[in-house]
Image (cartoon, rainbow, N blue to C red):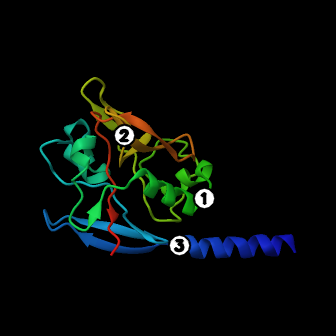
Amino acid sequence: MKKSLLLLSFIVLTQILIAQTSEFTDARDGKKYKTVQILEQTWMAENLNFEHQDSYIYENKEIYGHVYGRLYTWETAQNICPDGWHLPTDFEWDILIHSIDDPSYSGGKLKTYTHWSYPNTGASYLVGFNAMPGGFYSTEENFKERQFRAYFWSQTEHNQDSAGVLILKNKSAWANRTSENKQKAFSVRCLKNKK
């Protein structure tokens, strides 16, 4: 009986989490992005790779831009998403995290299997978010942590110098929300505006 209930729970959960995927073309440069609908939210399923004068490609290698997208400071990230999309707030990140699982497991479910350094704890493509470990850039530290961490900006300002960030790590399944310095450059995932 317990096994049957566990199996039924898993089937129901899987049906809830199986993502509806699609594709979006950014009219600004013609780049195509995979998208994924997770419950009521529609996300880009790839890191944004829109060229801007205040954006960075990891180690200035074009191939990294194709794989991990570009890195943006918080100020630039505020208005970098294409028309009809926006930089998510802390609250919208929380909705995503808690709709998938407890935060101690949902980070793993956001990650892709590939491009992460071992052990890529909890990685699962179940929800189709496809989080990529693009690392970060700062003028003090240069480029760091590609393949080890994914940093995604939130539009929520925490104080004059810092704003919200979602961090995923190769050695953890945790989805960690914290504050980071606005001058650092992180990845951007755009969320579709609600009609």
Residue 139 shown left or right of residue 52 in the figure:
right
Element carrying mark 2: strand
Q: Which mark is residue 18?
A: 3
Badge 3 amino acid: Ile
Q: 171 or 98: nearer the eye?
A: 98
Residue 56 pos. (x, y %):
21, 41
Residue 154 pos. (x, y %):
37, 48
Q: Which mark is residue 101?
A: 1
Q: 160 or 168: nearer the eye?
A: 160
Element carrying mark 1: loop
For marks 2 and 3, give the one nearer the viewer: 2
Q: 20 or 97: nearer the eye?
A: 97
Which residue is disc 2 drawn over? 163
Element carrying mark 3: loop
Q: Residue at x 53, y 46 (%)?
A: 120
Which of marks 3 and 1 precedes in the sequence? 3
Badge 1 amino acid: Asp
CA separation in Å, label 1 and label 2: 24 Å
Q: 63 or 170: nearer the eye?
A: 170
